[in-house]
Amino acid sequence: MLLLFGQSMKAQTGACQSYEAAFNLEARMRYGLTLQQAKEWILEDGYSDGSAACFSSIKNEINPMPYAFPLVNQTLYRKARR
């Protein structure tokens, strides 16, 4: 039973997990990576399939929550802090 539960909780490779990808982009950028380097990590970790539709979904997660993802939001939309 435990084995089945553990298998179902694994990240699906090739799937687009937009919220997890957005969270990991922010986390990687906090460690000093550039946006491009952080994108490469989410591809390697399986949070994104690399498609334009997936990156659009990730942007849709980030855009309404600028305070949850401040580094990514600022980088993507080049907003200056006031």
Image (cartoon, helix red, strand yellow):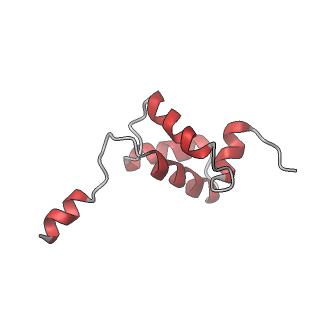
Image position, residue 71 (x, y; %): 68, 51
Give the residue at the far top of this rendering: 52
Among all residues in the image, which is located at the extreme bottom?
A: 2
Quadrant including the N terminus: bottom left
Q: Quadrant of residue 7?
A: bottom left
As drawn, 20 above or below 79: below
Q: Residue furthest right?
A: 82
Q: Is residue 76 left or right of residue 45?
A: right
The x and y percentages for residue 15 are 34, 41
Residue at 78% over, 41% down: 79
Q: Quadrant of residue 68?
A: bottom right
Residue drawn 54% across and 47% down? 38
Residue under the image location 67 percent in, 38 percent down:
76
Looking at the rendered structure, the number of numbered marks drawn on it comes to 0
Q: Position of residue 20 (x, y in %)?
A: 46, 52
Nearer to us in this view, 31 or 53: 53
Left or right: residue 31 versus residue 3 is right
User: Which residue, as the protein is rendered here, is positioned at the far left?
Assistant: 1
Residue 19 horizontal/vertical position (percent): 48, 50
| 82 lies left or right of 20 | right
